[in-house]
Image (cartoon, rainbow, N blue to C red):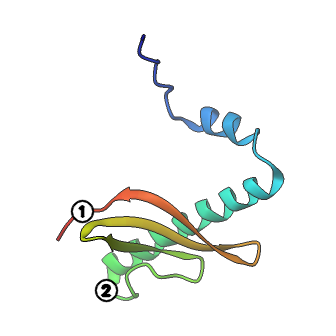
Amino acid sequence: MARRKQTELNLETVVRWASGLSRPQRRDLIDALLALDEIEDSDRSLNSNGNGNGGGTAGGYIELKTINGCGPYRYLRFRSQGQYKSVYLGKGEED
């Protein structure tokens, strides 16, 4: 079987993909991206002046989980449309 060509991930590709989502799915995507942005801003603030709580903002936070002794696994936790949501981000770095 021929290997499928991997699509380059860029803004145009993401927006084209998002246009196929339902309105509630797009809202969840927007809220998740805003939470990631706030976490990044919080991390910058923490690194620059030593203040903050490690990225746990009102908009969202990254949680590291160990499952059955494996991990850590990174999850984005955020609030969207009045509900808490969770998105798996991939395996985290071990300390």
- Say which label, 1 or 2, has the lower sequence index: 2
Residue at image location 42% in from the left, 11% down from the top: 1
Q: Is residue 26 left or right of residue 55?
A: right
Q: Residue 50 carries which label?
A: 2
In the figure, residue 44 lies in which quadrant? bottom left
Q: Is mark 1 on a helix, strand or loop?
A: loop
Cβ–Cβ below 8 Å for labels 1 and 2? Answer: no
* Residue 22 position within the rendered picture, expressed as x and y whole percent measured from the top left: 80, 49
* Residue 88 position within the rendered picture, expressed as x and y whole percent measured from the top left: 47, 60
- Mark 1 to mark 2: distance in Å? 22 Å
Residue at image location 79% in from the left, 58% down from the top: 24
Front position in the image: 62 or 2: 2
Q: What element carries label 2?
A: loop
Residue at image location 37% in from the left, 89% down from the top: 51
Question: Residue extending furthest front?
Answer: 68
In the figure, residue 2 lies in which quadrant? top left
The residue at which mark 1 appears reads as: 93
In the figure, residue 50 lies in which quadrant? bottom left
Q: Which amino acid does label 1 sit on?
A: Glu
